[in-house]
Image (cartoon, rainbow, N blue to C red):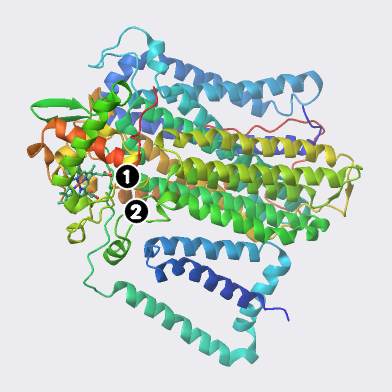
């Protein structure tokens, strides 16, 4: 038996929706905002395929036309014409009804850094700044290892409460903050950044973030008031070393 | 004179007629822009004029040359139609294009100077070499990007014109003609669209190389969200281009053999498309944030970075090309003895390239560190180009002297397909507006980056939402002008009819040929 096109369409749309929703059942939901975009294009693509030949377009539209024109379908028509606005109303209602959730905010986690950073009574040019200890990795590996170790001490004295003892952002305070502390594991955060950027973020902390990272300023402390310049560089060495990430370097 | 097909001649003539009106409107709007700039930003314009004075003069003079060649080209069309004179005419056409390109390059130098000033010292004082000012860091990347984009854009506008005429056509001959015109224009638009992402990557890489800070503002800051919008629109472009090809198969009686593959191609393109616009940082509701434990999604996160995007876009290109190949053979039966082998080789090339692209994307994306992340893009592009070139060559050889399944029917296109052509033109316009906004907004509070600040009282960098609204309104106004121009061109061909006459005047076919080069003059 051949499934009518219109039914095929409905089934395909439902399947697509199911696929996008499925990760949510396993604890890694695809955000609603994205599902909406995904669904929009899934529906459009299915429609395009179904109308790409005249024959299948006819098959798809005939029942809809019949529903509107055909006198013998008056009853069905009335039902459909009543149900569709009701569904629409329910959706609209659910979208506009007030809730206790904080509004969704679009914030940049990795905003553009300023060109210069004032700290430790000096001015750093973020565009050219490099980790002064990085070169030891090649020149003096033993010394470098030493520094990484010291960085580890800095980290476990100051940072692991939030960023976690495995640098996975699951520290015991972490859940209390919004925005959550960032993990250093994985390829999304420090693996994408230059050390000068990381230095800036650590030195100035949450209050140092520019406007596009508002409205919630992060709880990241202003470490330039609490640590020395060297301690920060060492901590940076440590967080890259521990996670196996390599800082981004610019061509040239 | 690659082809003796007189249809191209007619198409070119028709479109130059449209261009004439467009040209005068360009000049008017250009004047408006210049006057407003001088009125609202007198100091800035004073500075620019002092620096670029000679080039502005050159611009005006070249504009004369442009007008002259345009008018000779248009009014001389019928006077120079055969033999040697036709060649002269053609040359004037080429000069017209060359001069137009030159104008664009000059204007580009002003714009790129504002982004990446060259030839001046830190305080902005001229150092004596005007060529250094023109040939600033981002000049060539922008030149290339705009050159290619203008061909694509020109194609899409011709396509929209053809669609407009197709939908208002009153008989089968007209319908067939405009269907063919729409098809050709679409082909040019898509042909130029294919290399555009790569020109875009080059430009972005150069922006990063010029100023890291500008690069991060562009890709990592709030503007990143405009790139998601861009991705969505580009995806829509690809979908509508494919849809147009699929609908176009109806013109061939032999198409039934291939229509069953459409759904698979569509499936792949849709998946690529979803990857292509999945953002790196997600908009999350608080409960989603808590469940995920962070801004970054465990499996969507990796889709947000470059290697995944490159993989997606390359596959999207390859499958669009596949749609085109199927379209080409819809009505043909090859007669060469090695046809089966030829198809098998093509299939093998496709599969090898796709595997290679996916492998490179996954390997470089997830198993190497950032320094090498971009390294995947070059071999991926190479694979895509290999597929396109080698399969095209095989295809041409294989279908030499091929038999037709039945009569090819221009004009047998469903009306809905024409809206795909409209969508193409609208999307291009919109995209150009949005990306143009980014291009100038990454300067932030600078008129000329790091050299001259914008100190005016009301200066601010518009939020994305605000900018998007302004650009959308501009797009609507622009499309309205375009439709007005289309309507005008039709008007000029109209004569008030005698009631006894049934058909409107159709411009007669003339036996001569001229390859089409879309007229492009956009900012």
The residue furthest top is B128
Q: Where is mark 1, residue-wise?
A: A189
**Circle 1: is it few (<14), some (14-19), or many (20+) Cα within 10 Å?**
some
Q: From what the image shows, is residue B362 above or below residue B448?
A: below
User: SS class of the residue under badge 2?
Assistant: loop
Q: Chain of mark 1?
A: A
Q: From what the image shows, is residue B440 above or below residue B94?
A: below
Task: Locate residue B277 relative to residue A168 in the image: left or right.
Answer: right
Q: Where is mark 2, residue-wise?
A: B296
Q: At which x and y percent is residue B299?
A: 43, 56
Q: Do tag 2 and tag 1 residues touch (Cβ < 8 Å)?
A: yes
- Please give the name of the residue rendered at 36% of the width and 25% of the height, measured from the top-left corner: B210
Q: From what the image shows, is residue B89 above or below residue B372?
A: above
- Please give the name of the residue rendered at 47% of the width and 86% of the height, measured from the top-left corner: A82
- Please give the name of the residue rendered at 44% of the width and 53% of the height, measured from the top-left corner: B278
Q: Chain of mark 2?
A: B
Q: CA distance from mark 2 to mark 1?
A: 9 Å
Depth check, front residue: B472 or B302: B302
């Amino acid at each position: 038996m051949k499934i009518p096109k219109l039914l095929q369409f409905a089934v395909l749309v439902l399947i697509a929706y199911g696929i996008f929703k499925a990760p949510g059942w396993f604890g890694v939901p695809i955000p609603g905002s994205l599902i909406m975009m995904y669904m929009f294009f899934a529906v459009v693509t299915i429609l395009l395929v179904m109308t790409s030949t005249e024959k299948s377009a006819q098959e798809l539209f005939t029942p809809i036309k019949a529903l509107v024109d055909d006198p013998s379908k008056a009853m069905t028509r009335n039902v459909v014409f009543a149900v569709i606005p009701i569904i629409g109303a329910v959706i609209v209602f659910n979208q506009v009804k007030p809730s206790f959730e904080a509004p969704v905010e679009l914030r940049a986690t990795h905003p553009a850094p300023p060109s210069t950073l004032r700290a430790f009574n000096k001015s750093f040019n973020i565009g050219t700044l490099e980790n002064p200890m990085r070169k030891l990795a090649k020149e003096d590996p033993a010394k470098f290892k030493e520094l990484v170790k010291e960085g580890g001490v800095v980290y476990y004295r100051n940072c692991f409460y939030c960023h976690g003892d495995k640098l996975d952002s699951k520290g015991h305070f972490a859940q209390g903050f919004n925005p959550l502390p960032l993990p250093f594991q994985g390829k999304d955060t420090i693996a994408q950044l230059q050390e000068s950027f990381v230095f800036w973020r650590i030195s100035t902390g949450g209050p140092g973030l520019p406007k596009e990272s508002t409205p919630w300023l992060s709880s990241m402390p202003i470490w330039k008031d609490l640590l020395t310049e060297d301690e920060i560089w060492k901590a940076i060495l440590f967080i890259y070393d521990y996670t196996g990430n390599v800082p981004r370097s610019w061509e040239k | 004179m690659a082809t003796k097909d007189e249809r191209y001649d007619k198409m070119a003539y028709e479109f130059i007629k449209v261009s004439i009106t467009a040209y005068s409107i360009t000049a008017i709007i250009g004047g408006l822009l210049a006057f407003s700039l001088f009125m609202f930003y007198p100091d800035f314009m004073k500075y620019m004029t002092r620096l670029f004075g000679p080039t502005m003069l050159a611009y005006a003079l070249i504009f004369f040359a442009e007008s002259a060649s345009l008018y000779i080209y248009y009014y001389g069309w019928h006077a120079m139609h055969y033999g040697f004179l036709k060649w002269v005419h053609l040359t004037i056409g080429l000069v017209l294009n060359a001069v137009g390109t030159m104008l664009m390059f000059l204007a580009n130098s002003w714009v790129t100077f504002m982004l990446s000033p060259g030839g001046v010292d830190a305080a902005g004082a001229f150092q004596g070499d005007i060529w250094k000012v023109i040939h600033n860091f981002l000049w060539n990347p922008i030149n290339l990007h705009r050159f290619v984009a203008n061909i694509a854009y020109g194609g899409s506008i011709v396509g929209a014109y053809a669609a407009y005429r197709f939908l208002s056509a009153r008989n089968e001959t007209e319908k067939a003609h405009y269907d063919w015109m729409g098809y050709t224009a679409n082909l040019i638009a898509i042909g130029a669209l294919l290399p555009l992402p790569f020109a875009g990557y080059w430009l972005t890489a150069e922006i990063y190389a010029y100023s890291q800070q500008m690069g991060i503002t562009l890709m990592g800051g709030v503007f990143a969200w405009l790139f998601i919008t861009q991705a969505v629109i580009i995806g829509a472009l690809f979908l509508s281009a494919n849809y147009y090809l699929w609908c176009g198969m109806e013109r061939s009686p032999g198409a039934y053999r291939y229509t069953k593959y459409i759904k698979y191609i569509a499936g792949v393109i849709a998946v690529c498309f979803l990857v292509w616009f999945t953002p790196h940082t997600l908009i999350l509701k608080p409960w989603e944030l808590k469940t995920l434990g962070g801004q970054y999604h465990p499996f969507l996160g990796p889709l947000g970075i470059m290697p995944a995007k490159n993989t997606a876009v390359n596959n999207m290109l390859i499958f669009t090309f596949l749609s085109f190949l199927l379209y080409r053979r819809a009505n043909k039966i090859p007669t060469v003895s090695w046809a089966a082998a030829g198809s098998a080789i093509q299939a093998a090339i496709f599969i090898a390239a796709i595997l290679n692209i996916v492998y490179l994307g996954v390997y470089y994306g997830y198993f190497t560190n950032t320094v090498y992340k971009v390294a995947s893009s070059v071999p991926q592009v190479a694979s895509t180009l290999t597929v396109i070139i080698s399969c095209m060559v095989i295809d041409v050889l294989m279908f030499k002297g091929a038999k037709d399944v039945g009569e090819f029917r221009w004009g047998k296109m469903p009306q809905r397909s024409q809206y795909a052509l409209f969508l193409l033109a609208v999307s291009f316009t919109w995209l150009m507006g949005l990306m143009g906004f980014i291009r100038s907004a990454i300067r932030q509070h600078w008129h000329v980056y790091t050299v001259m600040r914008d100190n005016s009282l009301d200066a601010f960098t518009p939020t994305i939402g605000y900018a998007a609204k302004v650009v959308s309104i501009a797009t609507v106004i622009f499309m309205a002008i375009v439709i007005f121009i289309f309507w005008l061109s039709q008007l000029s061909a109209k004569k008030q009819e005698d009631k006894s006459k049934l058909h409107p005047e159709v411009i007669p076919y003339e036996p001569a040929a001229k390859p089409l080069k879309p007229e492009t003059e956009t900012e």
